[in-house]
Amino acid sequence: MANPTTRQTSGSQTGSDVKQWAQEAGAQLADKARDTASSVAGQARDAASSVARTAGNVASAIGERADDATSSVGSGIKSLAGTLRENAPHGGMMGSAASSVADALETSGRYLQEHGLGDIGSDFVNLIRRNPIPAVLVGIGIGYLFARATRS
């Protein structure tokens, strides 16, 4: 018959081998999971960076188009000022009023041509900061007119 201690040693040796194999397999699996997670995180980081770059480029292009449109509007306003000067009477009260309006239009047109939307926004904010009470009153008036216009 077989020796019982040999079987026991062989059985415990097999159990130990299985345990060691399972530990090694678990360690390898954990390493692969870490590597995969790191790779996925890197790809997500790269994708987010690419999306941010693309969004920045699109925003920049939109800003440039808006500035070009603002400049075109400024040019049109200046042209309107010239047309008003040519066709308006040159003397009397109507002539001086037309000249004042043409000067204001020309100044506004030049401002729009020379400054972008960012400058216009900054100037608007500064105007409100310097005159907060009139700004609030104008806002209330515009809100009232808007409410009346949409109530029908």
Image: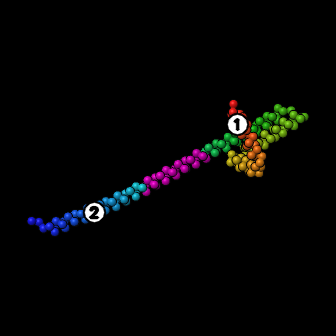
Q: Nearer the viewer, residue 17 or 94?
A: 17
Q: Amino acid at mark 2?
A: Lys
- Residue 31 vs 66, above or below: the answer is below
Kindly state the secondary structure of the residue where label 1 is placed. Answer: helix
Residue 121 - label: none
Mark 2 Cα shell of 10 Å, populated few (<14), some (14-19), many (≥20): few
Q: Which residue is mark 2?
A: 19
Which residue is found at the position 27% from the left and 63% from the top?
19
Q: Is residue 56 magenta?
A: yes
Q: Nearer the viewer, residue 119 or 15?
A: 15
Q: Amino acid at mark 1?
A: Ala
Please identify the quadrant where the N terminus is shown.
bottom left
Q: Is residue 130 magenta?
A: no
- Residue 14 vs 82, above or below: the answer is below
Which residue is found at the position 58% from the left and 45% from the top?
58
Which residue is found at the position 25% from the left and 61% from the top?
18
Q: Looking at the picture, how far across and down is residue 126, in whole percent?
A: 74, 50
Q: Earlier in the sequence, mark 1 or mark 2?
A: 2
